[in-house]
Amino acid sequence: MQVLRQLPQSSDPNLLSAAIPFADAGIYRISEDTALVQSVDFFTPIVDDPRLYGQIAAANALSDLFAMGARPITALNLIAFPVCSLGTDVLTAVLQGGAEKVIEAGAVVVGGHSVEDDEPKYGLAVTGLVDPRRMVTTIGARPGDRLVLTKPLGTGILTTALKGEVLSEADLAEAIAGMAALNMESSRIMMEIGVSACTDITGFGLLGHALEMAEASRVCLALEADALPVYPQAVEMAAMGLVPEGSYRNRAHYLPRVLGADRLPAESLDLLADPQTSGGLLISVAAEKAPQLLARLRSAGCRSWSVGRVEDSPAGRLRVI
């Protein structure tokens, strides 16, 4: 963020995301009822299976669009890969996994770019469409709203345990399925219900992304610690110290703005700060609509939990209750 502030700022009035604090994607209006929504993401392998890696990376990249209620239309592959050491079969499997998720999202892969690199990296640049009059952003959470989360926490901790060979991919089956799952159906349902605000939970963890929503909406988000869903074995791995570096960075940066954190055990703080890969949506919805939203999500097979509420103050803060 400090680097971005030093770059030239656009004055184009059609760049709608410039006026949205912590926007999940770039938003450019092309007509009164249509805006382009664009995002990009890629990362090194977090699982051993190359096809699953491709699926998770694609689901993660598409998540920013779904958080805003956009409909994906195109995707570009971005891949760095050591073909000589890993071979074309592995590369093909990664791209196949990514293409499967793009197709599931109703979009098309229109090309991409590759470079030779000793360490594999894969992701996508994605483009979608949204009506700017209806899009959902980090702005709009209102006091009295309920907070709904659509995927459990703990993927960063679990993949750290996988890399450390403490757990196997079979042990992570539920978390891997969750990371590979698109947020598409959750997005569709929230748009039909009508919600106040939304963001997806990725590298800054629930801690960071919730604080971004609180700051953008000028409210306080109160999270109910006992209501937060967690993938199996994540708490045990955190207690063993299998915590990714990103969690420590998130804790250092965001905890000063969190009220009530001092009463939580260390592993709970690690989970709040855990950098998620292809995490769920954090949705702020009017209290009277929350039961309907949860019922619709669950009936569609989308896991969902009521995890807190929106309060008026202290604005821009997170409170753990």
Image (cartoon, rainbow, N blue to C red):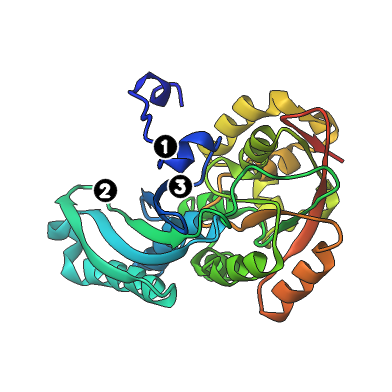
Q: Which mark is residue 13?
A: 1
| Residue 45, picture quadrant | bottom left
Inter-mark Cα distance, 2 to 1 = 40 Å
Q: Residues within 10 Å of mark 2 (few under 14, many from 20)?
A: few
Circle 2 sits on which residue?
119
Q: Are marks 1 and 3 in contact (CB under 8 Å)?
A: no
Q: Taking 169 as reference, is 232 left or right?
A: right
> Relative to the observer, which residue lies in front, 70 or 201?
70
Precedes in sequence: disc 1 or disc 3 = 1
Q: Amino acid at mark 2?
A: Glu
Disc 3 marks which residue?
Answer: 25
* Residue lying at 76% horizontally and 29% vertically, measured from the top left: 315
At 36% across and 71% down in the image, what residue appears?
107
Disc on the earlier residue, 2 or 1: 1
- Look at the numbered disc 1 and give the secondary structure of its residue: loop
Q: Position of residue 154 (x, y in %)?
A: 63, 53
Q: Amino acid at mark 1?
A: Pro
In the orientation shown, which residue stands out farthest toward the top?
A: 6
Among the two numbered marks 3 and 2 on one chain, the one whose residue lies closer to the N terminus: 3
